[in-house]
Amino acid sequence: MATLLYIIIGIIVLIAIFALMAPKSYDVSRTIEISKPKAEVFNTIKYLKKQQEWSPWDKKDPNMEKKFTGTDGEVGAINYWNGNKDVGEGEQEIIKIIKGERVETELRFIKPFRSTSNSYLDLSESGNGKTKVTWGFKGENKFPMSVIMLFMSMDKAVGKDFEEGLRNLKSILEKGQDLGRLK
């Protein structure tokens, strides 16, 4: 019986040590240059409905349930989704727009686990009618997720998806595809 007690205490101490060592936050971002003017790029990234054309998660489950509320492209617009195990369930709300510069959203994940993160798309001119786009994602690692993050990298988990999404966005814009119908 005493051995079992020592094992339980040891496990609790180990978890406490892991929790102290675990990363408390994450911040992942990727950047790409697009050969289009900043105003044109902004007019695409500010709309949640247009994201379905370049988002890697929409490609992972083209049949996911989606609902849009509010006025797309404005603060308060919400995109709700419910899909397969690769995309889960949640919603994205536009929380801040700096016209021509930045769109900030709050991501509220419901499944496979509850969490909230902030996402942003930043634009800057890079000369010759080109635009640098940075897509970022940041948030807090709460227990027990913080302990899990000792063994998993958020950068590796979503970094490749950001790269794919930015490549898709670049391809669509540089080919001159019209996403206007999705307003």
Image: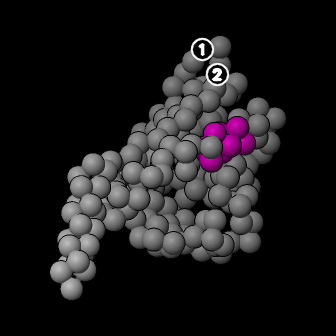
- Residue underneath mark 1: 127
Q: Is residue 166 magenta?
A: yes
- How crowded is the residue under tag 1: few (<14 C-alpha within 10 Å), some, or many (20+)? few
Residue at 58% across, 56% down:
48
Residue 142 at what x, y percent from top left?
A: 31, 61
Residue 116 at what x, y percent from top left?
A: 39, 61
Look at the numbered disc 1 and give the secondary structure of its residue.
strand
Image-based side of 62 in relation to 8, left or right? right
Look at the numbered disc 2 and give the secondary structure of its residue.
strand
- Residue underneath mark 2: 130
Residue 91 at what x, y percent from top left?
A: 50, 67
Q: Is residue 48 magenta?
A: no
Residue type, numbered disc 1: Gly
Q: Which residues are magenta?
A: 161-168
Image-based side of 91 in relation to 13, left or right? right
Residue type, numbered disc 2: Lys
